[in-house]
Image (cartoon, helix red, strand yellow):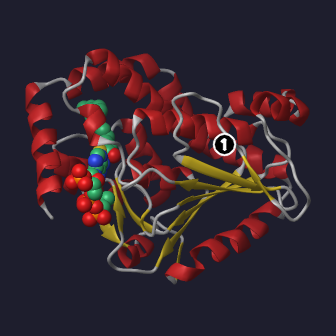
Amino acid sequence: MAALAVLRSSAPARLLSGSFSVHRGGLASWQHYQSRRPFSNNKILVELNESTGVAVMKMKSPPVNSLSLDFLTEFSISLEKLEIDRGCRGLILTSAFPKIFSAGLDITEMCGKSAEHYAAFWKAVQEMWLKLYGSNMVTIAAVNGSSPAGGCLMAMCCDYRIMADNPKFAIGLNETQLGIVAPFWFKDTMINIVGNRVTEQSLQLGQMYSAPEAHKIGLVDLLVPEDKVQSTAAAVMTQWLSIPDHARQLTKSMMRKPTIDRLVKQQEADINNFVSFITRDSIQKSLQVYLDRLKQKK
Ligand SMILES: CCCCC/C=C\CCCC/C=C/C(=O)SCCNC(=O)CCNC(=O)[C@H](O)C(C)(C)COP(=O)(O)OP(=O)(O)OC[C@H]1O[C@@H](n2cnc3c(N)ncnc32)[C@H](O)[C@@H]1OP(=O)(O)O
């Protein structure tokens, strides 16, 4: 968070616009951030409304917004651009697809690849978390569909979660159901929202909660009809933005810094730990079985 705060205060918006081709239009128009990265397929659509200072980031990686290495890289770059843009104070994170917010980490990135690939992938997951959890912006997750594991983590990184009131949509950290283990920083993020007891039970059982259940345990803050998710997110954002930025940001930092510092202090060790865990034959087998089951369920 401190690093982001420094970035934000030292990088003028003019420089950002020049470097990243941000095109600004009239007050009422939406701005489109175009990524110049050659590998980018634009898996993420960002629209910044200059008059409100609110960006809407829509995940758009078919079929289920799984978090691949490319996706995560594009996500972190997009987020960093917004973070250093003084015209942007709030971010609404949502999905371009009805019914799916994000399917979590792309399981194919964790199967049958090299140790180097796993290390690069895990670093990208860490970066996504560090940037989103440590953001100075007001962040609101407009959860318009199911959101297992890494998808739940993304939503949990935000300051406020609004979910579509549909019992068919589920959210939670289901890692143990795949035979894998949510790392300590996933666990800490959840504890900070729902407390130790609920987190322990959720993680051991790999529990997925329907939208009403998630609301009941406080994993999501508000349930609204599916067609009201975006408008409610915008209304809640207005409330949050009425608080002076510096006071809100310092408070957020005070609450989250210890959790963030814990990973920052052992980022390399956490990558090594992931690589040695995911390369075990037994873990590779579990993931493959899970993936095959997913593909066969149709
Ligand atoms: C001791 C210390 C340990 C340290 C750390 C060690 C371990 C690492 C921990 C790693 C943490 C992991 C976090 C994760 O996020 S793991 C991913 C968990 N995600 C899931 O379990 C979601 C699985 N997907 C679903 O439940 C459903 O697909 C759905 C999201 C509810 C959507 O359902 P539906 O609309 O019916 O779509 P389909 O199921 O038909 O899926 C469409 C195609 O997408 C493929 N798919 C789905 N999810 C994923 C995924 N996460 N990754 C890759 N691919 C995915 C699915 O197979 C279908 O593919 P097809 O069209 O080719 O058949």
Left or right, 88 with reference to 121: right
Classify mark 1 as within 8 Å of ligand 1 or not, answering yes or no: no
Inspect this view and state whether residue 259 appears: no
Viewer-nearest residue: 146 or 180: 146
**Residue 57 image position (x, y, % from top left):** 62, 54
**Residue 89 image position (x, y, % from top left):** 79, 51
Task: Identify the residue position indicated by label 1 in the image.
Answer: 135
**Residue 262 image position (x, y, % from top left):** 49, 29
Residue at screen point 75% across, 32% down = 20
Which amino acid lies under the numbered mark 1 shown in the image of this protein?
Answer: Ser
Residue at screen point 42% across, 38% down = 185
Please tell me how crowded label 1 is: few (under 14), some (14-19), or many (20+) other residues with Cα within 10 Å: many
Left or right, 233 with reference to 187: right
Inspect this view and state whether residue 62 appears: yes
Viewer-nearest residue: 292 or 211: 292
Q: What element does badge 1 sit on?
A: loop
Which quadrant of the figure has residue 281?
top left
Q: Quadrant of the N terminus?
A: top right
Check the image and report above or below for 178 versus 194.
above
**Residue 36 image position (x, y, % from top left):** 65, 31
Residue at screen point 72% across, 65% down = 237
Check the image and report above or below for 157 versus 39.
below
Q: Quadrant of the C terminus?
A: bottom left
Left or right, 50 with reference to 203: right
Residue at screen point 51% across, 30% down = 39
